[in-house]
Image: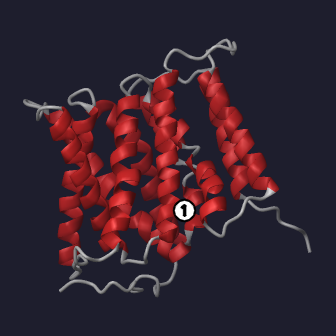
Amino acid sequence: MSESTQSIKTEGDKKPFEGVGFWAVAIFLVIVWGTAFNMVDVGIRYMSPIWLVAFRTVLASILILGYAFYKGLRLPKISDPRWRWYIVLGTSGMTLPFFLISWAQETIDSGISAILVGIMPLITIFLAHYFTSEKLTWRKVIGFCIGLIGTIILFLPENFSLGLISDWKAQLLALAAAFCYGSTTVGIKRAPETHSVVAAALMTICAAVMALIAALVTEPIPQNIQPMGWWMVLGLAIGSTGMATIVFLQVIDRNGPTALAKINYFPPFVSVLVGIWWLGEPFTPRIAIAFGTIMFGVWIARNKVVKSA
C-alpha cells in the first residue's frame, strides 16, 4: 500500500533533537561526512569514479529500501509527483556531486576537496535568497565575500603569485559539487514533506538509477576489484550515502536547516585531520590560511549578532 500524495508528518510531530541526542547526531554526521572524502580518495585507486558512485548509490538504495520496508513504510506510486522531485534531488544531491568529487580527487587531496565543498553553506545562503523566504543580509553578504576570498587563496600557488595552481581544474570540480549540494539543500526545503526514510529511499533509488545508467554507458563493468576497494564502497554506502541521508533529513525535519548548517562547519576539519593521519596528505600554510578564511566566512554568515538587553 503506497503513501498518499499528501505530505505526512509522522516525524515532524516528534520533538527536536536536544542535548545529548543532538550531539550524538551531530558527531555521527561530522564523522561520516568528513571521512567520506578520505574513503573516496582510497576507493578511486581501485575503480573509476563513475563506478565508485554507481556501486555506493546502488548498495545504499538497497539498504535504505530494506530499512523502509522493515519500518512498515512503502514508496509512493510512480504517478506521485514526489518521484519527479527526487529524480532531480537524487541527481543534484548524490549522483553528480559524488562523481565530481571522485573525479576531482584523482588529482587533489581529500582534505582540499573537503575544504572546497565546505563553502556549500555560503552557496546555500545565496541560492536561498532567490528561491526561499530566507533573504540575504549584510552579515550574510560579508560572510559570503570572506568565504570567496578563502576559496581564491586555495587556487593560488604556494608563493601566492597571481597565477593559478596547477590542479585548479580539479578544484573547480569540487566547487561545482558544493554548488550541487547547496542547490539540493534549497530544493529539499521546497519539496513535498515526506517521511525521512521514504525520502532517503526515493533520493538514493533515483541517484542509483542515474549513476548506473551513466556507468554502463561510459565504461565496462570493472573486474577483479581488490577487497579494499569494496570496503570503501561498503563504508560509503552505509555511512555517508545511507544512514547519513536519513539522519540529515531527520535533522532538517525536527530541528530545521539552521541546526544542520552549524553541523556543516566541522566535516572539513575531520577530513583534513584524517587525510594527514591516514593518507599522509600535506597541510601547507596556503591550505591553512584558506581553510581558516572559508570557515570564518561561514561562521560570519551563519551567526546572528546578539544584542544586549
Quarter of the image containing the C terminus? bottom right
Residue 62 lies in quadrant:
bottom left
Q: Pinpoint residue 102: horizontal percent, then vertical percent.
A: 35, 35
| Front residue (pair 190, 277) | 190
Residue, x 23% and y 76% (percent of image)? 75
Residue at the right extreme of this rendering: 309
Q: Is residue 122 left or right of residue 78?
A: right
Q: Pinpoint residue 72: horizontal percent, then vertical percent.
A: 21, 82
Q: Is residue 77 left or right of residue 188?
A: left
| Front residue (pair 76, 42) | 76
**Label 1 neighbourhood size at 10 Å, few (<14), some (14-19), many (20+)?**
some
Residue, x 18% and y 76% (percent of image)? 69
Q: Pinpoint residue 213: horizontal percent, then vertical percent.
A: 19, 46
Residue, x 44% and y 56% (percent of image)? 29
Quarter of the image containing the N terminus? bottom left
Q: Is residue 297 left or right of residue 96?
A: right
Label 1: which residue? 260
Q: For numbered disc 1, what is the local secondary structure? A: helix
Q: Is residue 18 left or right of residue 10?
A: right
Q: Pinpoint residue 48: horizontal percent, then vertical percent.
A: 24, 30
Q: Is residue 303 visible?
A: yes
Q: Amino acid at mark 1?
A: Leu
Residue 146 lies in quadrant:
top right
